[in-house]
Image (cartoon, rainbow, N blue to C red):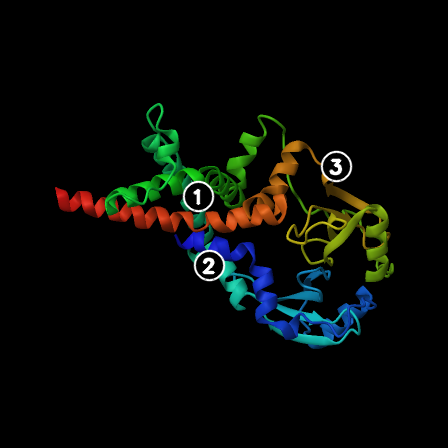
Amino acid sequence: MLIGLTGSFVVFYREIDAALNPALYTPATPEQSVVLSEVIRAAAAADAAPISTILVPDRTWPVWIVIHAHETQRGHYPNRWTTMVDPSNGKVLGRRDYINAFALKVYRLHYTLLLYEWWGRELVGVAGFMLLGLTASGLFLWWPKPGRFWRSISVRRDVSLLRFVFDVHGAAGFWALFVLLGLSVTGIGLVFPDVVRPIVGVLSQPTPDHSPRIAAPPSAGTPLLSPDAIMRRAQEAKPGMAVAMLSPPSEARNTWRVQFRPEGADPAVRTRGAIWLDPWSGAVVHDRTFDAMSLGDRYVAEQLWLHNGATFGLAGRLLVFAAGFAPLALFVSGLIMWLKRRSGR
């Protein structure tokens, strides 16, 4: 129930976050005149911690969002802070603790049960297996006799309370069946990708997703390209795609990672593929966008957007939002039936 209800919230968590914090997400004017290097300078002046990711403005969050990686104890959830920068004038709109903001905390509750240090993510994955089993066993128990299909998926009013509850249980289970199956399968894949890859590989072999490094970087003193030049190289490399996120080089990876989504696509699909760029020459070191992926890689990359319905636009998101309430309906109706049977015994 908890995972289902928080999942419904997470479908629209960015919209909810923007509505709850208008001061952080309201630029002075709609004009976007600030370049990436100015955004980085403004964010660095506000927070000296290393920058891990930069989110490009979109319709939902129409400001630059710079995520800073603060020091984190080993095994603990990453300590991230964000700086919001106005794209029209380069001014800092505010800073905040990213992982403890309300909407993001609900997101973490859904994804890790707020138990990151105690295998919370894995527990959610186990819950995905349980949901898969409950859905399959529920379908088996519900399977109607010939000629009673429509009756078995409808709720009648002129019946006893127990019969009404039984109808609610069967109808809710049937109408949410395929969405719950999809949510459980994609949820398991997000938490346990190594479980899904061999299954996907039966049809199309996915390749390992890695963050490439420049094995032999230029000699010391070779100038790095500016962030603005990296942005231009990324746009030139993938015309027709919009830059969605950028991750500067780090200790673990000496390349720029640039993530894209299709131009004009619903911003609920945050990214669809990425490329890695040489920070000295701007050359594409590795291409993992959709046109360079196998079918298996595409499925693995699309799992998150299938999970929250964004792959199918607003209609898909609303369907997943509604399905998040199904476990609550099934639990309440199932509990009533169980208590009634127990008292009868």
Residue 114 seen from this side: yes
Which residue reaches farthest left? 345
User: Which is more toward the observer, 201 or 320?
Assistant: 320
Residue 128, label in figure: 1
Task: Pinpoint residue 242: horizontal percent, then vertical percent.
Answer: 77, 52
- Quadrant position of residue 17: bottom right
In the rendered structure, which amino acid carries the disc numbered 1?
Gly
The label nearer to you, 1 versus 3, is: 1
Sequence-wise, the earlier of marks 2 and 3 is 2
Element carrying mark 1: helix
Marks 1/3: CA–CA distance: 30 Å
- Quadrant position of residue 98: bottom right
Say which residue appears at 51% left-offset and 58% top-offset: 107
In the rendered structure, which amino acid carries the disc numbered 3?
Ala
Marks 2/3: CA–CA distance: 34 Å
In the rendered structure, which amino acid carries the disc numbered 2?
Leu
User: Which is more toward the observer, 339 or 190?
Assistant: 339
Left or right relative to 162: residue 151: right
Task: Pinpoint residue 131: horizontal percent, then vertical percent.
Answer: 40, 42
Element carrying mark 2: helix
Q: Give yes or no for contact between labels 1 and 3 (Cβ–Cβ under 8 Å).
A: no
Which residue reaches farthest top? 146
Element carrying mark 3: helix
